[in-house]
Image (spheres, rainbow, N blue to C red):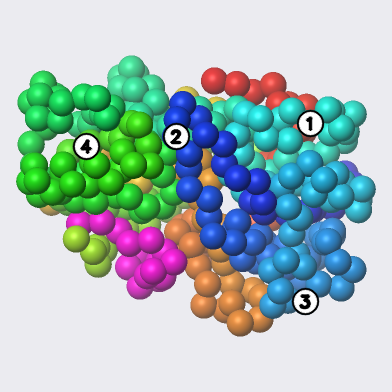
Amino acid sequence: MTQPRVAVLYQALEPPVINGISKPKKPGGYRDSGADIAYVLRKICHIPVVTPVPDPNPVQDNDWCFPDDEEGILSAFNTGATHLWANTILFAMHPLQVSERLTEHCGSVSIVGQPPQLVEAYDDKALVYEIMKSHDGFTLAASVALAASDDLTTTLRRHSLRYPLIAKPVRGRGSHGVKLCRDEEALQVHARYLFGESPKIIIEEYLEGEEATVTVMPPPVDKAKGYWAMPIVTRYNHMDGIAPYNGTVAVTKNSRVVGQAEYEQDPAYERAARECERVAALLKATAPIRIDVRRFKEGSNFALFDVNMKPNMTGPGRPGREDQASLTAMAAEGLGWSYSRLLAEILATAQPLSVVRKINV
């Protein structure tokens, strides 16, 4: 088999407005993690990586990854890339999906990432909730999608939702806009703030127990096995009930892998892992997804409350980045994998662009 030549894409395009809602763009467009990926693939995995400049500087993010607009993608392809690592937010009208200039290359280039049409659909957290609710066997937090025209008090009463409650955007990034509201006054204030960004928000039951996150890997290209959950990472040191954004508090300061003995002694972990695998299969993921779960209370089962179609992929390797980590990289450590091994395993799940373009909801 010919060795892949990888180009990493970062988020240069503004996320589109979808049903009046826009997902906030990541500051820097994931260039930092994109550079981490490209550097480690080249320097540690010894996999050919094409870059925008001939001799990229290890500390310059821009030297390592291409913009995800049409010109950037074509530049990567014309530089010799056979595999495009989409370290960006995709959507149905993204060039990877619709560019006619890329169509002629569909059979000769592979994608590491989710199908753009699926990402656009499943970045809508209310839709994902409804999909999971429509299938038996998922443990979920009680929730409701609220429009600006809805009466808050009536809606909460109709759905038997009691304080404290979580209010969050329908299309959010990380912990942006996620707030624990302990009474109606706090919820009304935060709802007005969220409605300033979006015509629809989510109100959900506050889960007061242990929080954890489950990264699910897609099947290998040969389908030798199905979707499978990596070791669970538990989270702690919350700020007002919410796990803080990793740009504010490093995940190494508030997260750890659940040990094997701990996992085996509590069947709730196994149950959560199996449910998350089912979600990944239901959503037809072609790259890792990360699902956040939390116990209703101490000792209870976990409820699934957030599905992340593009987990953060930051990791160590580049000079000056030795202390970098991500929840998915921590899960990989639970398998005994280095960050470089994780990236190599993810690269092995790449699908031809011709296949990715055909996958829809």
- Above or below: residue 19 compared with residue 113: above
Give the labeled residue for mark 1. Answer: 99
Give the labeled residue for mark 4. Answer: 204
Per the image, label 1 sits on a secondary structure element best described as loop
The amino acid pointed to by label 1 is Ser
Mark 3 vs mark 1: give the one in front: 1
Nearer to us in this view, 297 or 97: 97
Circle nearer the N terminus (1, 2): 2
In space, the residues marked 1 and 4 are separated at their CA atoms by 38 Å
Quarter in which the C terminus is drawn: top right
Q: Is residue 246 covered in magenta?
A: yes
Q: Is residue 27 covered in magenta?
A: no
Give the labeled residue for mark 2. Answer: 21
Q: Residue at x 87, y 32 (%)?
A: 101
The answer to which quarter of the image holds residue 272 is top left
Quarter in which the N terminus is drawn: top right
Q: Badges 1 and 2: C-beta atoms under 8 Å apart?
A: no
- Residue 99 drawn at (x, y percent): 79, 31
Give the labeled residue for mark 3. Answer: 57
In space, the residues marked 2 and 3 are separated at their CA atoms by 37 Å
Per the image, label 2 sits on a secondary structure element best described as strand
Asked whether the viewer can see residue 300, the reply is: no
Crowding near pointer 1: few (<14 within 10 Å), some, many (20+)? Answer: some
The amino acid pointed to by label 4 is Glu
In space, the residues marked 3 and 4 are separated at their CA atoms by 45 Å
Circle nearer the N terminus (1, 4): 1
Residue stretch rendered in magenta on the structure: 241-255
Q: Residue at x 60, y 34 (%)?
A: 91
Magenta: predominant secondary structure element?
loop
The amino acid pointed to by label 3 is Asn
